[in-house]
Image: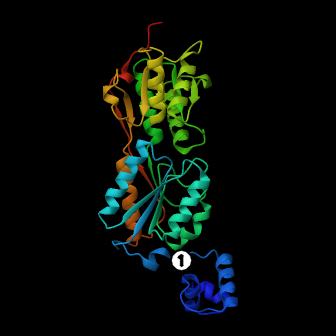
Amino acid sequence: MTDVAREVGVTAKTVSRVLNDDGPVAVETRERVMAAVRKLGYQPNLMARNMRVGARDAAVGLIIPEMGNPFFGTVAGGVESAVRARGLTLIVGSSSETAELEQSLIATFLARRVSALMIVPSAAGDHRHLRTERVAGLPIVFLDRPAVGLRADSVVSANREGARAGVAHLVAYGHRRIGFVGDQPATLYTRRERFLGYRDALGRAGLPFDRALVETGHDQEAAAHATLRLLELADPPTALFAANNLASMGAVLALSRAGRRDVALVGFDDLPLAEVLDPPLTVVAQDPAGMGAVAAQLVLARLDGDRSRARRSLVPTRLLPRGSGELPPPPR
Protein backbone atom coordinates (compact mmCIF):
# COMPACT_ATOMS: atom_id res chain seq x y z
CA MET A 1 0.00 0.00 0.00
CA THR A 2 2.92 2.30 0.75
CA ASP A 3 4.36 1.58 -2.70
CA VAL A 4 1.06 2.51 -4.35
CA ALA A 5 0.86 5.71 -2.31
CA ARG A 6 4.43 6.65 -3.29
CA GLU A 7 3.70 5.94 -6.96
CA VAL A 8 0.64 8.23 -6.95
CA GLY A 9 1.96 10.86 -4.54
CA VAL A 10 -0.77 10.46 -1.93
CA THR A 11 -0.93 9.07 1.59
CA ALA A 12 -1.39 5.39 2.41
CA LYS A 13 -4.66 6.36 4.09
CA THR A 14 -5.95 7.68 0.76
CA VAL A 15 -5.02 4.42 -0.93
CA SER A 16 -6.84 2.54 1.84
CA ARG A 17 -9.95 4.66 1.29
CA VAL A 18 -9.94 3.84 -2.42
CA LEU A 19 -9.41 0.12 -1.97
CA ASN A 20 -11.95 -0.20 0.82
CA ASP A 21 -14.41 2.37 -0.59
CA ASP A 22 -14.23 4.01 2.81
CA GLY A 23 -14.55 7.78 2.69
CA PRO A 24 -14.56 10.51 0.05
CA VAL A 25 -11.81 10.53 -2.60
CA ALA A 26 -11.68 12.68 -5.75
CA VAL A 27 -12.53 10.79 -8.93
CA GLU A 28 -9.19 11.67 -10.54
CA THR A 29 -7.28 10.50 -7.46
CA ARG A 30 -9.26 7.24 -7.37
CA GLU A 31 -8.42 6.57 -11.02
CA ARG A 32 -4.71 7.27 -10.43
CA VAL A 33 -4.65 4.95 -7.42
CA MET A 34 -6.31 2.12 -9.34
CA ALA A 35 -3.91 2.62 -12.27
CA ALA A 36 -0.97 2.29 -9.84
CA VAL A 37 -2.55 -0.81 -8.29
CA ARG A 38 -2.70 -2.44 -11.72
CA LYS A 39 0.80 -1.30 -12.66
CA LEU A 40 2.40 -2.62 -9.46
CA GLY A 41 0.36 -5.82 -9.31
CA TYR A 42 -0.76 -4.89 -5.81
CA GLN A 43 -2.72 -7.35 -3.68
CA PRO A 44 -3.68 -6.59 -0.07
CA ASN A 45 -1.64 -8.39 2.55
CA LEU A 46 -4.48 -10.73 3.44
CA MET A 47 -3.04 -11.96 6.71
CA ALA A 48 -2.19 -8.50 8.01
CA ARG A 49 -5.54 -7.16 6.96
CA ASN A 50 -7.96 -9.24 8.92
CA MET A 51 -6.48 -12.59 9.87
CA ARG A 52 -4.61 -13.97 12.78
CA VAL A 53 -4.10 -17.69 13.34
CA GLY A 54 -7.10 -18.86 15.32
CA ALA A 55 -9.22 -15.89 14.33
CA ARG A 56 -12.86 -16.87 14.19
CA ASP A 57 -13.36 -15.90 10.55
CA ALA A 58 -9.99 -17.11 9.21
CA ALA A 59 -10.20 -19.60 6.34
CA VAL A 60 -7.91 -21.81 4.28
CA GLY A 61 -8.74 -22.38 0.61
CA LEU A 62 -8.15 -25.86 -0.85
CA ILE A 63 -8.43 -26.62 -4.57
CA ILE A 64 -8.63 -30.25 -5.69
CA PRO A 65 -9.08 -31.68 -9.21
CA GLU A 66 -12.10 -33.89 -8.56
CA MET A 67 -14.68 -33.98 -5.80
CA GLY A 68 -15.67 -37.56 -6.66
CA ASN A 69 -12.18 -39.04 -6.35
CA PRO A 70 -11.93 -40.63 -2.88
CA PHE A 71 -8.19 -39.93 -2.75
CA PHE A 72 -8.69 -36.17 -2.81
CA GLY A 73 -11.60 -36.38 -0.40
CA THR A 74 -9.32 -38.09 2.11
CA VAL A 75 -6.61 -35.47 1.51
CA ALA A 76 -9.17 -32.77 2.28
CA GLY A 77 -10.17 -34.60 5.46
CA GLY A 78 -6.55 -34.65 6.63
CA VAL A 79 -6.25 -30.92 6.00
CA GLU A 80 -9.55 -30.12 7.68
CA SER A 81 -8.77 -32.02 10.87
CA ALA A 82 -5.50 -30.14 11.34
CA VAL A 83 -6.70 -26.61 10.54
CA ARG A 84 -9.94 -26.96 12.51
CA ALA A 85 -7.91 -27.63 15.65
CA ARG A 86 -6.47 -24.13 15.19
CA GLY A 87 -9.84 -22.46 14.67
CA LEU A 88 -9.50 -22.15 10.89
CA THR A 89 -12.26 -23.01 8.42
CA LEU A 90 -11.52 -25.05 5.29
CA ILE A 91 -13.13 -23.97 2.00
CA VAL A 92 -12.87 -26.53 -0.82
CA GLY A 93 -13.36 -26.09 -4.56
CA SER A 94 -12.85 -28.39 -7.56
CA SER A 95 -10.90 -27.36 -10.66
CA SER A 96 -12.26 -30.29 -12.72
CA GLU A 97 -8.61 -30.77 -13.75
CA THR A 98 -8.64 -27.54 -15.80
CA ALA A 99 -6.14 -24.69 -15.45
CA GLU A 100 -8.82 -22.06 -16.20
CA LEU A 101 -11.12 -23.14 -13.38
CA GLU A 102 -8.15 -23.54 -11.04
CA GLN A 103 -7.14 -19.91 -11.65
CA SER A 104 -10.75 -18.77 -11.23
CA LEU A 105 -10.97 -20.53 -7.85
CA ILE A 106 -7.68 -19.01 -6.76
CA ALA A 107 -9.01 -15.55 -7.60
CA THR A 108 -12.23 -16.30 -5.70
CA PHE A 109 -10.37 -17.49 -2.62
CA LEU A 110 -8.09 -14.45 -2.67
CA ALA A 111 -11.15 -12.20 -2.94
CA ARG A 112 -12.55 -13.94 0.13
CA ARG A 113 -9.26 -13.09 1.88
CA VAL A 114 -8.29 -16.62 2.81
CA SER A 115 -5.31 -16.81 5.15
CA ALA A 116 -3.62 -19.55 3.07
CA LEU A 117 -3.96 -21.41 -0.22
CA MET A 118 -3.57 -25.16 -0.72
CA ILE A 119 -3.65 -26.45 -4.28
CA VAL A 120 -3.62 -29.82 -6.01
CA PRO A 121 -2.54 -28.48 -9.43
CA SER A 122 -4.43 -29.33 -12.58
CA ALA A 123 -2.56 -31.21 -15.29
CA ALA A 124 -1.94 -28.05 -17.33
CA GLY A 125 -1.54 -25.59 -14.47
CA ASP A 126 1.01 -22.75 -14.43
CA HIS A 127 1.52 -20.91 -11.14
CA ARG A 128 3.74 -17.97 -12.01
CA HIS A 129 0.70 -15.73 -11.52
CA LEU A 130 0.97 -16.42 -7.76
CA ARG A 131 4.45 -14.95 -7.38
CA THR A 132 3.11 -11.66 -6.02
CA GLU A 133 1.12 -13.43 -3.30
CA ARG A 134 4.04 -15.72 -2.53
CA VAL A 135 6.43 -12.77 -2.13
CA ALA A 136 3.86 -10.91 -0.02
CA GLY A 137 3.90 -13.78 2.46
CA LEU A 138 0.68 -15.62 1.69
CA PRO A 139 1.23 -19.28 2.67
CA ILE A 140 0.81 -21.44 -0.44
CA VAL A 141 1.23 -25.23 -0.33
CA PHE A 142 0.86 -27.62 -3.25
CA LEU A 143 -0.33 -31.18 -2.64
CA ASP A 144 0.15 -34.39 -4.62
CA ARG A 145 1.85 -32.47 -7.45
CA PRO A 146 4.37 -29.60 -7.18
CA ALA A 147 3.82 -26.12 -8.56
CA VAL A 148 4.81 -25.17 -12.10
CA GLY A 149 6.81 -21.97 -12.50
CA LEU A 150 6.73 -21.12 -8.79
CA ARG A 151 9.01 -21.98 -5.90
CA ALA A 152 6.62 -22.98 -3.11
CA ASP A 153 6.05 -25.61 -0.44
CA SER A 154 4.78 -28.97 -1.68
CA VAL A 155 3.76 -32.29 -0.17
CA VAL A 156 3.87 -35.33 -2.46
CA SER A 157 3.84 -39.11 -2.18
CA ALA A 158 6.95 -41.17 -2.79
CA ASN A 159 5.57 -41.95 -6.26
CA ARG A 160 8.67 -43.22 -8.00
CA GLU A 161 9.83 -45.33 -5.07
CA GLY A 162 6.37 -46.81 -4.54
CA ALA A 163 5.90 -47.72 -8.20
CA ARG A 164 9.36 -49.27 -8.26
CA ALA A 165 8.46 -51.44 -5.27
CA GLY A 166 5.14 -52.50 -6.79
CA VAL A 167 6.64 -53.58 -10.11
CA ALA A 168 9.60 -55.25 -8.39
CA HIS A 169 7.04 -57.27 -6.43
CA LEU A 170 5.60 -58.61 -9.68
CA VAL A 171 9.09 -59.38 -10.96
CA ALA A 172 9.83 -61.30 -7.76
CA TYR A 173 6.86 -63.58 -8.50
CA GLY A 174 8.30 -64.50 -11.88
CA HIS A 175 6.67 -62.03 -14.26
CA ARG A 176 8.68 -60.81 -17.23
CA ARG A 177 5.99 -59.07 -19.30
CA ILE A 178 4.38 -56.44 -17.09
CA GLY A 179 1.87 -53.99 -18.50
CA PHE A 180 1.50 -50.39 -17.35
CA VAL A 181 -1.91 -48.66 -17.23
CA GLY A 182 -1.55 -44.98 -16.38
CA ASP A 183 -3.25 -41.63 -16.39
CA GLN A 184 -3.40 -38.96 -19.07
CA PRO A 185 -1.60 -36.81 -19.95
CA ALA A 186 1.80 -38.47 -19.77
CA THR A 187 3.27 -35.18 -18.54
CA LEU A 188 1.19 -35.25 -15.33
CA TYR A 189 3.64 -35.27 -12.42
CA THR A 190 2.26 -38.33 -10.62
CA ARG A 191 1.93 -40.33 -13.84
CA ARG A 192 5.44 -39.40 -14.91
CA GLU A 193 7.00 -40.32 -11.56
CA ARG A 194 5.20 -43.66 -11.37
CA PHE A 195 6.14 -44.48 -14.94
CA LEU A 196 9.78 -43.77 -14.07
CA GLY A 197 9.44 -46.17 -11.13
CA TYR A 198 8.04 -48.80 -13.51
CA ARG A 199 11.01 -48.29 -15.83
CA ASP A 200 13.42 -48.40 -12.86
CA ALA A 201 12.10 -51.79 -11.72
CA LEU A 202 12.33 -53.27 -15.20
CA GLY A 203 15.86 -51.99 -15.63
CA ARG A 204 17.03 -53.31 -12.27
CA ALA A 205 15.63 -56.73 -13.17
CA GLY A 206 17.34 -56.70 -16.56
CA LEU A 207 14.01 -56.74 -18.39
CA PRO A 208 13.56 -54.89 -21.69
CA PHE A 209 11.12 -52.00 -21.91
CA ASP A 210 8.34 -52.70 -24.44
CA ARG A 211 6.32 -49.64 -25.44
CA ALA A 212 3.47 -51.92 -26.55
CA LEU A 213 2.88 -52.80 -22.89
CA VAL A 214 2.06 -49.17 -21.93
CA GLU A 215 -1.54 -47.93 -22.10
CA THR A 216 -3.39 -44.89 -20.75
CA GLY A 217 -6.90 -44.06 -19.58
CA HIS A 218 -7.99 -41.10 -17.43
CA ASP A 219 -11.14 -42.58 -15.90
CA GLN A 220 -12.31 -46.04 -14.85
CA GLU A 221 -13.96 -46.98 -18.14
CA ALA A 222 -11.05 -45.69 -20.23
CA ALA A 223 -8.65 -47.68 -18.04
CA ALA A 224 -10.79 -50.80 -18.54
CA HIS A 225 -10.53 -50.41 -22.32
CA ALA A 226 -6.78 -49.81 -22.00
CA THR A 227 -6.44 -53.04 -20.02
CA LEU A 228 -8.41 -55.01 -22.60
CA ARG A 229 -6.14 -53.70 -25.35
CA LEU A 230 -3.15 -55.07 -23.44
CA LEU A 231 -4.81 -58.44 -22.94
CA GLU A 232 -5.53 -58.67 -26.67
CA LEU A 233 -1.89 -58.31 -27.72
CA ALA A 234 -0.29 -61.19 -29.58
CA ASP A 235 2.16 -61.50 -26.68
CA PRO A 236 0.11 -60.08 -23.76
CA PRO A 237 1.41 -59.20 -20.31
CA THR A 238 1.13 -61.77 -17.54
CA ALA A 239 0.93 -58.97 -14.94
CA LEU A 240 -0.32 -55.40 -14.76
CA PHE A 241 0.74 -52.35 -12.82
CA ALA A 242 -2.13 -49.84 -12.53
CA ALA A 243 -0.69 -46.41 -11.77
CA ASN A 244 -3.61 -44.85 -9.84
CA ASN A 245 -6.87 -45.77 -8.15
CA LEU A 246 -9.06 -45.22 -11.24
CA ALA A 247 -6.66 -47.28 -13.36
CA SER A 248 -6.85 -50.05 -10.74
CA MET A 249 -10.65 -50.04 -10.80
CA GLY A 250 -10.61 -50.12 -14.59
CA ALA A 251 -8.15 -53.02 -14.61
CA VAL A 252 -10.25 -55.00 -12.12
CA LEU A 253 -13.34 -54.35 -14.24
CA ALA A 254 -11.60 -55.44 -17.46
CA LEU A 255 -10.22 -58.63 -15.94
CA SER A 256 -13.69 -59.48 -14.65
CA ARG A 257 -15.31 -58.82 -18.03
CA ALA A 258 -12.70 -60.98 -19.75
CA GLY A 259 -13.09 -63.76 -17.20
CA ARG A 260 -9.36 -63.62 -16.53
CA ARG A 261 -8.13 -64.80 -13.14
CA ASP A 262 -4.60 -65.60 -14.27
CA VAL A 263 -3.25 -62.04 -14.64
CA ALA A 264 -1.41 -60.59 -11.65
CA LEU A 265 -2.28 -57.01 -10.69
CA VAL A 266 -0.69 -54.40 -8.43
CA GLY A 267 -2.40 -51.03 -8.11
CA PHE A 268 -1.01 -47.71 -6.96
CA ASP A 269 -3.23 -46.30 -4.22
CA ASP A 270 -5.60 -48.34 -2.09
CA LEU A 271 -9.28 -48.82 -2.90
CA PRO A 272 -12.36 -49.21 -0.72
CA LEU A 273 -13.26 -52.91 -0.44
CA ALA A 274 -9.97 -53.93 -2.09
CA GLU A 275 -9.70 -56.77 0.42
CA VAL A 276 -13.02 -58.34 -0.61
CA LEU A 277 -12.19 -58.61 -4.31
CA ASP A 278 -11.38 -62.06 -5.67
CA PRO A 279 -8.45 -62.20 -5.42
CA PRO A 280 -7.94 -59.33 -2.96
CA LEU A 281 -6.09 -56.44 -4.55
CA THR A 282 -2.39 -55.95 -3.86
CA VAL A 283 -1.61 -52.23 -3.75
CA VAL A 284 1.04 -49.62 -3.17
CA ALA A 285 -0.87 -47.64 -0.57
CA GLN A 286 -0.52 -43.88 -0.26
CA ASP A 287 -1.35 -41.93 2.87
CA PRO A 288 -3.72 -39.19 1.65
CA ALA A 289 -4.86 -38.23 5.15
CA GLY A 290 -1.22 -37.97 6.21
CA MET A 291 -0.46 -35.88 3.13
CA GLY A 292 -3.25 -33.47 4.05
CA ALA A 293 -2.07 -33.27 7.65
CA VAL A 294 1.56 -32.60 6.66
CA ALA A 295 0.44 -29.87 4.25
CA ALA A 296 -1.75 -28.30 6.93
CA GLN A 297 1.14 -28.27 9.40
CA LEU A 298 3.26 -26.48 6.78
CA VAL A 299 0.53 -23.86 6.38
CA LEU A 300 0.22 -23.39 10.13
CA ALA A 301 3.98 -23.04 10.51
CA ARG A 302 4.00 -20.35 7.80
CA LEU A 303 1.14 -18.53 9.52
CA ASP A 304 3.10 -18.71 12.77
CA GLY A 305 5.98 -16.86 11.13
CA ASP A 306 8.19 -19.54 9.54
CA ARG A 307 9.99 -17.75 6.70
CA SER A 308 12.44 -20.52 5.76
CA ARG A 309 12.97 -21.52 2.14
CA ALA A 310 10.28 -23.45 0.29
CA ARG A 311 10.56 -27.17 0.85
CA ARG A 312 9.17 -30.43 -0.52
CA SER A 313 7.90 -33.05 1.92
CA LEU A 314 7.82 -36.67 0.75
CA VAL A 315 5.12 -38.92 2.24
CA PRO A 316 6.11 -42.64 2.16
CA THR A 317 4.03 -45.36 0.52
CA ARG A 318 3.51 -48.98 1.66
CA LEU A 319 3.25 -52.18 -0.35
CA LEU A 320 0.25 -54.23 0.83
CA PRO A 321 0.37 -57.81 -0.57
CA ARG A 322 -3.13 -59.28 -0.59
CA GLY A 323 -3.27 -61.85 -3.38
CA SER A 324 -3.66 -60.29 -6.82
CA GLY A 325 -0.01 -59.32 -7.02
CA GLU A 326 1.19 -62.74 -5.94
CA LEU A 327 -0.32 -64.75 -8.81
CA PRO A 328 2.45 -66.57 -10.70
CA PRO A 329 2.74 -66.29 -14.49
CA PRO A 330 1.18 -69.18 -16.45
CA PRO A 331 3.64 -71.91 -17.50
CA ARG A 332 5.12 -71.53 -20.95
The residue drawn where x is 31% and y is 57% is 81
Check the image and report above or below for 265 versus 140. Answer: above
The residue tagged 1 is 44
Answer left or right for 111 relative to 301.
right
The residue drawn where x is 35% and y is 52% is 77
Q: Quadrant of the N terminus?
A: bottom right
Q: Nearer the viewer, residue 261 or 301?
A: 261
Q: Nearer the viewer, residue 90 or 245?
A: 90
Q: Position of residue 283 (x, y in %)?
A: 38, 32
Q: Position of residue 117 (x, y in %)?
A: 47, 63
Residue 162 in sight here? yes
SS at badge 1: loop
The residue drawn where x is 61% and y is 22% is 212
Q: How many marks?
A: 1
Residue 175 in sight here? no
Answer left or right for 38 relative to 44.
right
Q: Nearer the viewer, residue 35 or 328?
A: 35
Q: Position of residue 116 (x, y in %)?
A: 45, 66
Instruction: Determine crowd level at label 1: few under 14, some 14-19, many 20+ residues with C-alpha closer than 10 A.
Output: some
Q: Quadrant of residue 303?
A: bottom left
Q: Quadrant of residue 174?
A: top left
The residue drawn where x is 43% and y is 31% is 267
